[in-house]
Amino acid sequence: MILIVIAVSATVWLAVTQQLVLYIHPRYIVFTVIMAAIALALGVMSVAVRPRSPEEPAVSKGWAKIVGITALVLSGVVAVSLIVVPPATLSSATASQRDIVGSTVGSDSQNADDVANADESLIASFTVVDWASLLRQTSDPSFYADKTATVVGFITESEDDPENIFYLSRFTVTCCAVDAQPTGIAVYAPNWKNSFAVDAWVEVTGLFEINPSSRSDASLVLVPNELSGVERPSEPYLY
Amino acid sequence: MTVPGSVENDHRHDHRHDQRPRRSRRRLLWLAIGTLGVAGVLALRAFTGGLDSVGVPNVPQDLLTLATSIIIESLPFVVLGIVLSIVVQTWLPDDLLMRYLPHAPVLRRAAISLFGIALPVCECGNVPLARGLILKGFSVPEAMTFLLAAPIINPITIITTYQAFGFDDGILVGRILGGLAIANIVGWLFSLHPQPNALLTDRFAAQCAAGSDHHRQTRSEKSLDIFMRESSVLMPAIFIGSLIAGAIQVAVPRDVLVSLGSNPLWSILAMMLLAFIISVCSSVDAFFILPFASTFMPGSIVTFLVFGPIIDIKMLAIMRTTFTARVLVQLSLVVALMSAFIGLVINFVA
């Protein structure tokens, strides 16, 4: 009963502070909050009425007792963490582990033929996922020559040329952070570590050009005209 | 003239009368403690929430984020499942569900395996509902048939699978028919057990045996009793399952699984392993696996979509509240073999 009170209270608090989007897709927020409110009401009423169970659970012995205590301790650790540790998005550690380079997330979010003659206002609205989608379809530099990209994401270190290239990354979420899939575009910024840390959120404005780095496998990279640190967006995941 | 027993009746009446204020005071005390507890948790959350960082390294921080995400995502479905279980156990007439079911066991289980069409609750929410069905008088194999089929034939699952794959490569049809076949065959297998109640944990079996002792409670009291009992049993399982699922996700590189994807057999095993680890809800797992569709064979995708809603880390932890460890091992083996068989057939036919 304590665990459900903690879980529900944390959910309500995250909803009030608009941080539930760090964990679940926005479409589930209303449903989650309604069910949390129901659970909270039922939980408080259950404690108030304190109905008597007809039987008490049997006392565990031996291994069952050890497993039970371990489960209790682990549940307690998660519960305390849920309350004490500040909410956070998934980091570059998970992005790297989930193969940001080989990601095919949002492959069809943009069609190169449709974008070829698109106007500037449409191109300005493209996210990391949109650009990654186009880069998978064409690596012809002339296609990108007149298309300035302005994108926001967090920094994930490039494995093959970490000094000069980082991946500007975003997670795409379908249901919750568990299914978050990373995608990213290579940004050429020599000695970027002098200015930014891994996981820092940055905004990059620039053009896609042939990769100057000989160590990196990326054929085209975003070469920044402007590169600046920004606050984490209120909705850090893309949907 | 003294009516026999009237003194005793008066005494009981007085006794109840004396107890009421004390009981009310006790309820008020617990209500105050409960409310203060919730307020305390919220206050602590508000205080620590202002901290930008407590210096948690990336990997443990991601583990906690993943575990929290699973808890928050599954919580509403579990609550919905408990509420539906309360409705089934307390508010529906006793014979309403039984009245129209066929008498022949095979047909009866087949009908029960279709209950999920009307109950759009994902797999973790179906566990309390299945427990409620057993308490309502369904046999253990019947409830198991419902539990296994419901998350796959739930309408939301079917719609999202259609949105992700359409009718391409028989993935949608393979998922629905495969899920129904596995649920009914597993239900039939466990119906051969001479003592089906031996499949249950001692604690839940005792709860089933004591179920009829609730008659002194009002319906409201019984409903709250069920809520308290079910949430007390299920929440630790969700917390533990979420923690383990999160830990394995940050520890096992996914490209190891993907590298196995183009082999008809290994891709099936890789998909089952991925489904087991990832523990993602059945109503959205089709979107989750969609990016893998270009790497993995169609039968392997079906294996993921059939195996995952039945067996994964989170589900095993939650089902352990109801079934013995031996049953869960047997269930996992049977479901794994059948899912792999379905996947192999589709891989070689499609």
Image (spheres, rainbow, N blue to C red):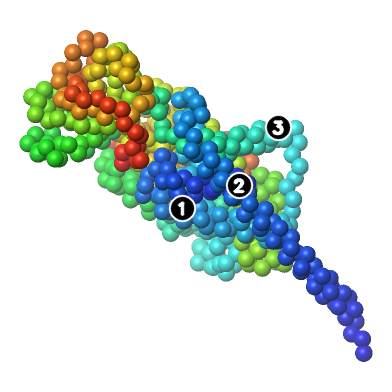
x, y percentage for residue B147? 51, 49
Q: What residue do we see at 69% from left, 35% from top?
A: A69
**Point 62% across, 37% down: residue:** A76
Is residue A48 placed above or below A229 in the rendered structure?
Answer: below
> Mark 3 or mark 1: which comes first in sequence?
1
Left or right position of B15 against B71? right
Residue A18 x, y percent position in the rendering? 41, 46
Marks 3 and 2: which is nearer the front?
2
Quadrant in which the C terminus of chain B appears: top left
Tell me if mark 3 has few (under 14), some (14-19) or many (20+) residues whose alpha carbon lies within 10 angstroms of its own.
few
Q: Secondary structure at mark 3?
A: helix
Residue drawn at x 20%, y 23% is A224
Q: Identify the residue at horizontal 34%, vertical 40% (top origin).
A: A235
Real-space Cα separation, disc 3 to disc 2, in angstroms: 30 Å
Could you classify mark 2 by the number of other residues whose Cα lies within 10 Å: few (under 14), some (14-19), or many (20 or more)? Answer: few
Tag 1 residue: A33
Q: Which residue is the site of mark 2?
A: B40
Q: Quadrant of residue B134?
A: bottom right
Of B299 and A177, nearer the camera is A177
Q: Position of residue B112 (x, y in %)?
A: 49, 56
The residue marked by circle 3 belongs to what chain?
Answer: A
Q: Which residue is mark 3?
A: A66
Residue B246 visible to the viewer: no
- Single out the residue that lies furthest toward the right: B1
Q: Amino acid at mark 2?
A: Gly
Q: CA distance from mark 1 to mark 2?
A: 19 Å
